[in-house]
Image (cartoon, helix red, strand yellow):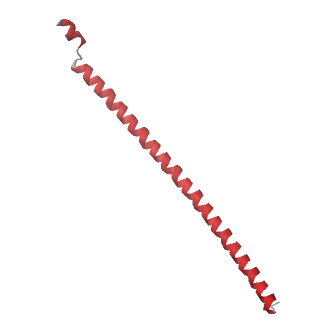
């Protein structure tokens, strides 16, 4: 029976383990919070880059369509025999 008592944890041992676990949990919480903040920052940066790319694409499409419409209008004017105003 004395051998079993020697192997049993004391209240002090349990308190030490509990204290260590609490410390580890607090440390892990801080690490997770930091990681989440970093991920949120990266997501916002990616969203901004994507938004900038979409804006550039919109501009390019608008310029292309404006150019294409202008060319078609000039061809139509030539075909019908109209002269553009101001030329």
Tell me the quadrant of the picture where the N terminus can be found: top left
Give the image quarter of residue 18: top left
**Horizontally, is 57 left or right of 23 in the view?**
right
Image location of residue 85, percent across then percent down: 78, 92
**Horizontally, is 17 left or right of 63 in the view?**
left
Give the image quarter of residue 55: bottom right
Query: From the viewer's perspective, is residue 42 above or below residue 62?
Result: above
Image location of residue 66, percent across then percent down: 70, 77
Q: Looking at the image, which is closer to me, 78 or 26?
A: 78
Residue lying at the far top of the rendered structure: 2
Residue lying at 45% horizontally and 42% vertically, measured from the top left: 34
Query: From the viewer's perspective, is residue 57 above or below residue 8?
Result: below
Residue lying at 74% horizontally and 84% vertically, measured from the top left: 73
Give the image quarter of residue 54: bottom right
Query: From the viewer's perspective, is residue 62 above or below residue 24?
Result: below
**Horizontally, is 66 left or right of 83 in the view?**
left
Image location of residue 23, percent across then percent down: 35, 31
Image location of residue 15, percent across then percent down: 26, 24
Q: Looking at the image, which is closer to me, 60 or 45?
A: 60
Residue lying at 66% horizontally and 69% vertically, measured from the top left: 59
Tell me the quadrant of the picture where the C terminus can be found: bottom right
Residue lying at 29% horizontally and 23% vertically, measured from the top left: 16
């Amino acid at each position: 029976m004395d051998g079993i008592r020697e192997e049993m944890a004391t209240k002090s041992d349990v308190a030490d383990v509990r204290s260590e676990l609490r410390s580890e949990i607090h440390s892990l919480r801080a690490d997770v919070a930091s990681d989440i903040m970093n991920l949120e920052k990266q997501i916002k940066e990616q969203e901004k880059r994507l938004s900038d790319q979409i804006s550039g694409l919109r501009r390019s499409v608008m310029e292309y369509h404006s150019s294409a419409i202008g060319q078609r209008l000039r061809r139509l004017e030539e075909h019908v025999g109209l002269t553009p105003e101001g030329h």
